[in-house]
Structures are given as C-alpha cells and as structure tokens.
Image (spheres, coloured by chain):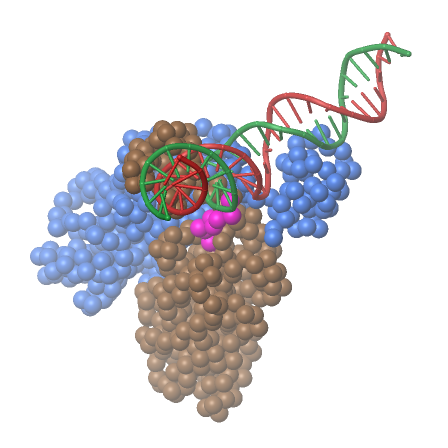
Chain colours: A brown, B blue, C green, D red
Amino acid sequence: MKPTIYDVAKEAGVSIATVSKIINNKGGISEKTKKNVLRIMEELRYQPSVMATALTGKNTKSIGLILPDLANPFFSELARKIEDRGHDLGYSIMICSTDYKKEKEKKYIQLLKSKSVDALILASGFENEEVINNLLKERLPIAIVAKNFPSISINTVAIDDFQGGYIATTHLIKLGHTRIAMIARDVYSNRERLRGYYQALRDYELDYKFDFCFAPESNVETGQKIAMEIFDSPMPPTAFVASNDLLAIGVIQAARQRGLNVPRDLSVIGFDNTIIAEVFDPPLTTVSQPIGDMGKEIMDLTVGEITGEKSKRKVILVPELIIRKSTGILTNEIDD
Amino acid sequence: MKPTIYDVAKEAGVSIATVSKIINNKGGISEKTKKNVLRIMEELRYQPSVMATALTGKNTKSIGLILPDLANPFFSELARKIEDRGHDLGYSIMICSTDYKKEKEKKYIQLLKSKSVDALILASGFENEEVINNLLKERLPIAIVAKNFPSISINTVAIDDFQGGYIATTHLIKLGHTRIAMIARDVYSNRERLRGYYQALRDYELDYKFDFCFAPESNVETGQKIAMEIFDSPMPPTAFVASNDLLAIGVIQAARQRGLNVPRDLSVIGFDNTIIAEVFDPPLTTVSQPIGDMGKEIMDLTVGEITGEKSKRKVILVPELIIRKSTGILTNEIDD
DNA sequence: AACATTAGGTTAAGCGCTTACCTTAACCTT
DNA sequence: AAGGTTAAGGTAAGCGCTTAACCTAATGTT
C-alpha cells in the first residue's frame, strides 16, 4: 500500500502533526527533526494524498477545461498551452469535449464540480448565461477563453473577433474582390466576426448579397457542402471568409471539384492559424489567434482568481492576418 | 457552500447512513424514504464529493493519460477517443504532455499518483521499463497504447508496426520504386516500422542504401530538413516512407523547394492518417492506425483492470494502407 | 402469548490529512 | 526561587463519505 502520513510519523518517531507541519513548511520544528522526517519521507517514497488534503478545505490543484472538441486542432493547440502553463503553476487539467452540445456542457460541469476542481475554464461555444451565473453564485472560479461574454463580469481572454472579421474582409476587398461570402458556425464569436465582415463591406460600399446561413458544424465536409451550394447561386462569390481553417479547407475542396483554382479563381481566408493552415496546399491565408498567449493568459487569470491574488479582468488580444497563398488578386471573372 | 450528505440527511430527517445507502443503491431502504431523500437531493442540488468518497477506499473515477504532445493531431485525436469512452464509463481524464522528455514523464507519473488516479494510460514514446515496473509493483493499473512493449505483461493496444512499415514499403515497390528512403523518430514503434521497411526491401531483393539516421523530432520542419539532406545525396530516393504524417508533409515541402512534383517525381507515404493527411494537397497516402478503436479498446481494458473484470491482454490491431494522391507510379528518373 | 425473523434504520469507526489549542521542558527575569 | 517566555511538538476534532455492526418495531409462527 501507499505509505500515509502515519507511516512516516511512526517511522520517524514523531506525531502526524509534526509531519504535516513539515510538509506544509509551517515552522516550529527543529532543523534536526525536519531533516530526519524528510529523509524518512524519501525512503518511504511518501506522497501526501491530494484527496485527503483537499478534504480539509485546501485546493485540489486541478482545473477543469471544457471545450467543444479536443480533436479540433485549434482546441488541441489551445489545450496544450493551457496544460503547459497549468503544470508550471502546479495544476493538472481535466479536459472534457462537448461537441457543442448543451447537455454535455451541463453534464461535464456537474462532473467537474463533483471532482472538486479549483476552477473551470470554458472555451468557446457556450451560450448559456444561466449556467455561468449559477457557477458564479457557487463561488467556483470560472474563466472564459476564446470567446467574449460581454454581459458577464468574469475572467476572459479572447481576441477581438469583430476586428478579425474586419481585417479578413478588408484584405480581400483590397485585393479587388467585390463578391465576398462568409461561412461560419452560429456562435457568439462568429457573430462578431460576421459583424466585422459586414462592417468592412459597408465601409467600402460593397453590397454583395448572397444567401448566408450559419453552418451547422465546423468541419471540412460542412464547409465543402455549403460552398457547393453557394457556388450554385446566380452570382457566386470570388472570395470567402471562413470562421475557421477547417471550413476554409472545405471551401477550397469544393472549389477544386468545380475546377476552380485557388487563389486564381477564388480567394479563401481561414481563421485560427492552426497547423493545418500552415501545411495545407496552398498554405492558407488566415486570421491568427495568438493561441500561446491565450492559453498562458487564461491560466494566469484563473490561478490568480483561485489564490485571490488577482482581480478579474478581460484581456482582448489582437488578431493578426497571416497572408499565405490562398488569397490573391482577382484576375478573371468566372461567371460571365 | 456546497451541500453535504449531512445537509441532505437533516433535511430529510434521516441519518447520513441512510442517505449514503440510497446514493449507492445498497437496498434495505423503503421506497418511501428513498423517494423522499432523492427529492431532497434534487432540491439541494446535492452532489456527493468524489474526494471524500475516494478517501474511503473507493475509486476516484479518474484516469491519467500521458502522451508526448497534445498538439500533435494523432495524439489529440486519440485523446479525444479515449476521453469519449472514458466518459461513457464514468471516468474523467487528466492529460499530461511530456514532449518525449523522460523527466517530464517521471514528474507527471508522480503527480498523477498523488492525485489518486485509478489508472494510468501511457501513449507511446516511452522507453523506460524501470518506471513501468515500479508502477506495476505499486499495483496501479497501467496500460500502453499506440506502442507495444513486448517484454512486459501489461494491457496494451497497438497496431502491428512491423506490418505497417512493410505494407507501406511494399506499396511503393509495387509502384516501381527501387530507391525508397525512410524517415522516422527513434522510438520503439518506429524501429518496428523500420524493420518492416527493411524486410520489404529484402523480400523484393532491393538493396538501396542511403544515409539513414533517426529524426530528432516528429514535426514538419524536421521532415523538411532531413529530406533536404537526403536529396543532396548521390543517388536520391524516388520515394519516402515517413513515420508520421507531419514528417511526410515536411518531405513533400522539401521536394517542392527542389522543384519536384509529388507524386510524379517523388512518392511519399505517411503514417497515422490524421486529419492533416486528409486535407493536405495532395491528399496523403498513409498507413492508418484505427484511432477510434484504439482509444475505445484501451479504455475498456483499463477500466476492466480497475474493476477486476477483465484479464490483461495485448490487442494488436492491423494497420491499413490508405491510398491517396501522394504516391504514384515512377515515371521519370530525376537524377540522370 | 411468547418468541423468532426481518425490513428499515441508526451508530460509530475510520479513510489521510490540517490545524486550533494544549503540554512540556528549557531558559529568562527580577 | 517563583513566575513568565518560548520553542518544539503532541492531542484531538473535523473535512464528507462508507460500512460493519447494531438496534427496533412490526410481522409471522406455533
């Protein structure tokens, strides 16, 4: 069996209180005893049980991370950064994927609470203010990353999605495109990006209309399917803004099926700058979210809240346009 | 504060033992009391504390997953499957990325033990038998996935790596290639794949020699760098077997820099069949590891060991060659 | 009527820790 | 020398739960 504090105490000939004080550096213990106990702990390979410690009111040093899909490169890269910073600060991470399902979101929040996590980090895809307010009431620290929840006062790290949509669209406009479509899943951040998109169109006095509708999922197939439909419309776009790299790739694949060359006949811009954008051919022009900073920052805020050392805040990072090869100057018209 | 079992008991006018029995479906409780207590639990939104439960000798219902890098698509896809199956069976997952570093591996194993995980799943990249033997001695259930550890009796799910290397190489040989190179990181599975590669060469009486050396990392840049060097050798290969999709992509990017067309001038075959293989252009021919099955299977074995319901076993899945567009018949010689 | 049985509970110990409070002995003061 | 300090460490309660052992009232048995 794993040794307990009792084993250490007995072996060292002291009380468990003494051992506990040594573990927690409480002082009031002579150097001699301390050395001795420490040695015994080594010998026995003693590790205090986090469970038992937590039961006495201390932290569990674990944090729950709820995100839509760990297999999505954006989230796995983000999770990795969060994990790294977490470990640096002494926390372990429990990850749960919701597939954008409300029931799963609820279920996992319950689950993580029952595991006594010290805090919860919610990554995008969440619309349910009520759930969040409940958590707030229970004084469980929570933080939101990769999404802004304007109405709630809560630690947040996100990019300026509006600006992201705006710079993506502007880039296309400057390349000469006038018929620019957007494709996005219906979540808050994307609505912001969409707003940025519309604003850019307005600022440059473009009024291209196409049959916009939100994508039901954020993956390659969905992007492809929707792009196909849009290509069939009377005045098809010459450029696309997609709300993530996967959708962008779907669009490009659809374009290929139609015999369209990217970027010659169609420009496509993605979002997130995941590894996929980098290795895809053509390499994707995309709006980069600074994933590393986001992960580190949200972890710091969260731990700050747990330890009570930091006041709550919202950190808005600026997105950056990464220009690669999937966008280009409009050269020939494809429809007439 | 979160309600405890005492709050429920008091509210319901019974003892905490009764409540506990109801929670654990122990019987010996009248329907009436049961209903009533259940109602109170609802009302109070009572959730038993996993911490406290664990302290009484029960399981924590959490499992540690140690893998090299969560940001690597292969592992994030695998982690997702493991997570899914885990949640189905009532377990949460704590994920730790080691970056193939031994110290981190050790550190995380300690950490997860102190958090009283019920079991540990180790995913590839681990060479340290001693560590594993120690864990075994402590009777902590552990399982290995995506890697075979032939000398140790331990739950394992892996593919037949030898066969994977063999079928990849054979495919290239059948396309007419005679100068086939391999690129891989130095871990056990890859040595097996390499063995399969050599076996195929031998079976078809090819004796192409090139300056093989293991890659220090498994990412795109490394693949690119190493491929560049190999291209510079006197008799460059016309085909590559890479030990994962990222390296394969690196090779293709190097080829492009050399003005080589894939697959016309160079065939490249990857490993893992991650999303990247699918979306890359040209879509990658690759050896597929059945990630979904692997994840589910390893979780089932692990939970089987925790509950004592299943005997230990090694499950060897068969890899499958996914033929896409990065390999083709050798048409023209590039060197003479 | 006297007793056994059983369904439906309760009591209390214990899981591995932390911590407020107590004890003890050595050392100071005046 | 009596009382006061102080350093070093011990005692025991309590965190939220499980469970073996025990209790009690109602029912069945003869």
- Quarter containing the C terminus of chain B: bottom left
Q: Quadrant of residue B220?
A: bottom left
What span is colored magenta in the figure? Answer: A56-64
Q: Is residue B335 left or right of residue A195?
A: left
Q: Is residue A55 left or right of residue A263?
A: right
Rendered residue at 47%/90% (across/down): A203
Residue found at the very far bottom of the displayed protein: A205
Q: Main secondary structure of the magenta part?
A: loop
Q: Nearer the viewer, residue B16 or A171?
A: B16
How far across and down, in percent of the image, does residue A163 sit?
Answer: 44, 79
Q: Nearer the viewer, residue A6 or A299?
A: A6
Rendered residue at 66%/32% (across/down): B26
Q: Nearer the viewer, residue B157 or B14?
A: B14
How far across and down, in percent of the image, does residue B275 sit?
Answer: 39, 57
| C26 is higher (above) or lower (below) than C29 | above
Q: Quadrant of residue B120?
A: top left
Q: Nearer the viewer, residue A247 or A265?
A: A247
How far across and down, in percent of the image, does residue B18 sit?
Answer: 69, 35
Q: Is residue B148 left or right of residue A112?
A: left
Q: Quadrant of residue A28?
A: top left
- Does the magenta portion include A61? yes
| A117 is higher (above) or lower (below) than A20 | below
